[in-house]
Amino acid sequence: MRLIINGEAREVDQVTNVAELLTVFKLEQKILVIELNRDIIERSEYANTALKEGDSLEIVHFVGGG
């Protein structure tokens, strides 16, 4: 499936929802903000949020530091 992730076209196989996508990128344990087609997705809805060809996602994760 072709998705736009953080402005870059990416091919991702065997992914049907946001939770699976995060697992592929090894981000499932990170504190994130996910925007799908300009709508913010709640963490509790990652597994229930289906992805389809051409969807646009912005994935932002927080980095600590000082």
Image: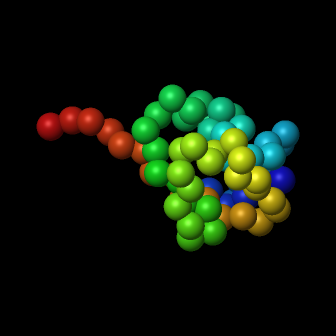
Position in image of residue 12 (x %, y %): 77, 46
Is the residue 41 above or below the residue 45 in the image? below
Is the residue 48 above or below the residue 6 in the image? above
- Observer able to see residue 7: no
* Residue beneath the point at 79% across and 43% down: 15
Q: Nearer the viewer, residue 49 or 55?
A: 49
* Residue beneath the point at 15% across and 37% down: 66
Q: How many marks?
A: 0
**In this figure, which colouring scheme has been used for the structure?**
rainbow
* Residue 24 left/right relative to 65: right
Position in image of residue 2 (x %, y %): 79, 57
Is the residue 43 above or below the residue 8 in the image? above
What is the residue that sits farthest to the left in this orientation?
66
Position in image of residue 50 (x %, y %): 76, 53
Answer with the quarter of the image where residue 3 lies. bottom right
* Residue beneath the point at 26% across and 36% down: 64
Position in image of residue 4 (x %, y %): 67, 61
What is the residue that sits farthest to the bottom in this orientation?
38
* Residue beneath the point at 68% across and 34% down: 24
Is the residue 43 above or below the residue 34 in the image? above
- Observer able to see residue 20: yes
